[in-house]
Amino acid sequence: GTIALADGTMNFLTLTGNGTISLPTITPDQYAHNIMLVVEGGAYLLDLGTVKHLYNPLAVDTTQTYNVMYLYNKIDGDWYYSLTQ
Protein backbone atom coordinates (compact mmCIF):
# COMPACT_ATOMS: atom_id res chain seq x y z
CA GLY A 1 0.00 0.00 0.00
CA THR A 2 0.90 3.66 0.19
CA ILE A 3 2.72 5.03 3.23
CA ALA A 4 2.43 8.82 3.71
CA LEU A 5 5.35 10.46 5.49
CA ALA A 6 5.24 13.91 7.14
CA ASP A 7 7.95 16.55 7.00
CA GLY A 8 10.34 16.65 9.97
CA THR A 9 9.54 13.15 11.23
CA MET A 10 11.36 9.96 12.18
CA ASN A 11 9.55 6.83 10.93
CA PHE A 12 9.91 3.08 11.42
CA LEU A 13 8.44 0.72 8.84
CA THR A 14 7.88 -3.02 8.72
CA LEU A 15 6.45 -4.01 5.36
CA THR A 16 3.76 -6.68 5.21
CA GLY A 17 3.54 -6.37 1.41
CA ASN A 18 5.03 -4.17 -1.30
CA GLY A 19 4.77 -0.47 -0.47
CA THR A 20 5.09 3.01 -1.94
CA ILE A 21 6.21 6.09 -0.01
CA SER A 22 4.16 9.26 -0.46
CA LEU A 23 6.21 12.39 0.30
CA PRO A 24 4.56 15.64 1.45
CA THR A 25 4.06 18.74 -0.66
CA ILE A 26 6.11 21.60 0.74
CA THR A 27 4.90 25.18 1.15
CA PRO A 28 7.23 27.47 -0.87
CA ASP A 29 7.95 29.86 2.03
CA GLN A 30 9.37 27.17 4.34
CA TYR A 31 13.11 26.49 4.40
CA ALA A 32 14.61 23.27 5.84
CA HIS A 33 12.93 19.90 5.40
CA ASN A 34 13.96 16.33 6.12
CA ILE A 35 12.43 12.96 6.87
CA MET A 36 14.13 9.91 8.38
CA LEU A 37 12.89 6.39 7.71
CA VAL A 38 14.14 3.08 9.11
CA VAL A 39 12.89 0.08 7.13
CA GLU A 40 13.00 -3.40 8.60
CA GLY A 41 14.51 -5.65 5.95
CA GLY A 42 12.47 -8.32 4.27
CA ALA A 43 11.26 -9.84 1.03
CA TYR A 44 8.94 -6.97 0.07
CA LEU A 45 9.74 -4.08 -2.27
CA LEU A 46 9.52 -0.41 -1.28
CA ASP A 47 9.15 2.39 -3.84
CA LEU A 48 10.96 5.30 -2.16
CA GLY A 49 8.64 7.94 -3.62
CA THR A 50 11.32 9.76 -5.63
CA VAL A 51 13.96 8.78 -8.18
CA LYS A 52 16.31 11.64 -7.21
CA HIS A 53 19.10 10.60 -4.90
CA LEU A 54 22.13 12.09 -3.23
CA TYR A 55 25.44 10.55 -4.22
CA ASN A 56 25.64 7.22 -2.47
CA PRO A 57 27.86 4.38 -3.78
CA LEU A 58 26.60 1.97 -1.12
CA ALA A 59 24.85 -1.19 -2.35
CA VAL A 60 22.01 -1.70 0.12
CA ASP A 61 20.77 -5.19 0.97
CA THR A 62 17.02 -4.64 1.39
CA THR A 63 16.65 -8.04 3.09
CA GLN A 64 18.44 -6.38 6.04
CA THR A 65 17.31 -3.28 7.96
CA TYR A 66 18.24 -0.05 6.18
CA ASN A 67 17.84 3.72 6.62
CA VAL A 68 16.46 6.30 4.21
CA MET A 69 17.09 10.01 4.69
CA TYR A 70 14.97 12.40 2.61
CA LEU A 71 16.08 16.00 2.04
CA TYR A 72 13.99 18.61 0.26
CA ASN A 73 15.78 20.74 -2.34
CA LYS A 74 14.12 24.15 -2.41
CA ILE A 75 15.89 25.09 -5.67
CA ASP A 76 14.22 22.43 -7.80
CA GLY A 77 11.26 21.76 -5.47
CA ASP A 78 11.83 18.03 -5.10
CA TRP A 79 12.74 15.43 -2.48
CA TYR A 80 16.07 13.56 -2.66
CA TYR A 81 16.96 10.38 -0.78
CA SER A 82 20.10 8.77 0.60
CA LEU A 83 20.38 5.14 1.76
CA THR A 84 22.58 3.74 4.53
CA GLN A 85 22.87 0.40 6.21
Image (spheres, grey):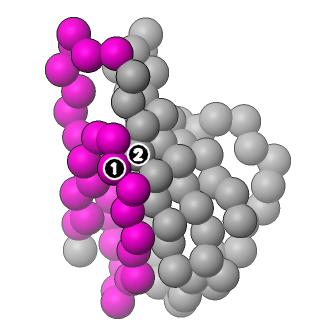
Of the residues shown, which amino acid type is indicated by label 2? Ile
Tell me, for residue 35, which label it has, or none.
Answer: 2
Q: Residue 38 location in percent, x, y?
A: 50, 66
Give the residue at x 25% y 48%. Answer: 6
Give the residue at x 23% y 40%. Answer: 24
Name the image quarter holding residue 35. top left
Q: Residue 79 location in percent, x, y?
A: 42, 34
In this rendering, is residue 81 above or below 39?
A: above
Give the residue at x 23% y 66%. Answer: 2
Q: Is label 1 in a helix, a strand or a loop?
A: loop
Of the residues shown, which amino acid type is indicated by label 1? Thr
Q: Residue 51 location in percent, x, y?
A: 49, 43
Tell me, for residue 24, which label it has, or none.
Answer: none
| The C terminus sits in image quarter | bottom right
In this rendering, is residue 34 above or below 1?
A: above
Q: Is label 2 in a helix, a strand or a loop?
A: strand
Left of 57 or right of it: where is 14?
left
Q: Which residue is mark 1?
A: 9
